[in-house]
Amino acid sequence: MNPLKRLILPVLLLIALIAAGVSGYVFIEGWPVLDAIYMVVITLSTVGFREVHALNAAGKLLTMGIIICGVGTAVYLLGQIIEIIVEGEIAGFRRKKDMDKIISERKDHYIICGYGRVGHQVAHELLSEGKTFVVIDNKPETAVELNGSKIPHIIGDITSDEKLEEAGISSAIGLIACADSDISNVFVTLSARALNPKLFIVARASQKETQEKLKKAGADRVISPYFIAGRRMAAMAVKPVAVDFFDTIMHSEHLELDMGEFCIKETSKLANKSLSESEIRQVSGAYILSIRKSTGNFVLQPLANTILEAGDIIVAIGMPKQLELLGKMV
């Protein structure tokens, strides 16, 4: 809410008291308008000047009423103004308006619901990928943390349809439900799927029995951090070199290798061609790791005679420039 709205009531009361005081001195005492205004001003300001003219009994009662009601209202108004300035509410309101504008202009972005330890890591990865996103979290300290950054955020109930719509869910392409509570993640998934049926939803599950519920709620992928951590620790113990290799490819800051996925459209020049005929390797330099067919099955280590069909998604690895060239070919 605009903090200046808090001043509307005391300002209106003060204006009403001034109007009543001026009218009272004019009609009760028969004073000129200028003298009446002057009397009201010196009374409200409590400067201690003497009356403009001698007052009768009715005029004295009017003056006492202005002092009791008017001075109290003026002091309250001044207190509200000082409180707004000290608490920085005007700056906060302007910051919120700027944030709302940024969020409203977002298209094809991601929404992170929950900004705990997992949410922080998700945001870090999206930033490293150059993706735009909006954070929704119910902790006030999240606003303090993110106010100094350029990350758009909304503080409130992550399961609220209103907050999801405020985050631009209708124009988003993905949502990550990574709250600490499985219940919250289920409700977020249900709400998000209802608001945007085409949204790609990834949800976190702490308990094994929650995974099926999240899928039924509409999650496209369900991730269990504890399951992944356990599997990864075992892999590092059994196959440390292989794990280090994939870490180097996926997360190294010095090695300019990346992975990408590209969908073969019906209008694509690659549709209905074999890998050898498409000349992807020769033109772009990217290496095709696998192909997910429209049926959902994967073709791992595809051969030269593997046919690319409309609806297939190819997973490739290469330098950023190579992947960019591949994207243009598709």
Image: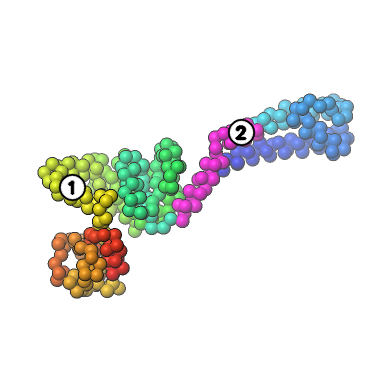
Secondary structure under tag 2 reads helix
Q: Which of marks 1 and 2 is in front?
A: 1
- Identify the image quadrant of the N terminus: top right
Q: Which residue has dot 1 on it?
A: 244
Separation (CA) of disc 1 from disc 2: 59 Å
Residue 323's label in the rendered image is none
Instruction: Give, as a single range, the part of the protein colored magenta.
Output: 77-105
Q: Which residue is drawn at 39% across and 42% down?
A: 137
Secondary structure under tag 1 reads helix
Three-letter amino acid code at disc 1? Answer: Asp
To which quarter of the image does residue 225 belong? top left
Residue 82's label in the rendered image is 2
Q: Camera-side residue: 241 or 305?
A: 241
Three-letter amino acid code at disc 2? Answer: Ile
Mark 2, residues whose alpha carbon is within 10 Å: few (<14), some, or many (≥20)?
few
- Identify the image quadrant of the C terminus: bottom left
In the displayed structure, 112 sits above or below 46; it is below
In the displayed structure, 294 sits above or below 49; it is below
Q: Residue at x 34, y 58 (%)?
A: 198
Q: Residue at x 45, y 50 (%)?
A: 166
Q: Residue at x 32, y 40 (%)?
A: 117
x, y percentage for residue 184?
A: 34, 42
Q: Camera-side residue: 124 or 13?
A: 124
Q: Which of marks 1 and 2 is nearer the N terminus?
A: 2
Tell me, yes or no, if residue 117 can be seen here.
yes
Mark 1, residues whose alpha carbon is within 10 Å: few (<14), some, or many (≥20)?
few
x, y percentage for residue 282?
A: 21, 69
x, y percentage for residue 147?
A: 45, 42
Lateral position of residue 317 relative to residue 190, left or right: left
x, y percentage for residue 72?
A: 68, 29
Lateral position of residue 290 relative to residue 195, left or right: left
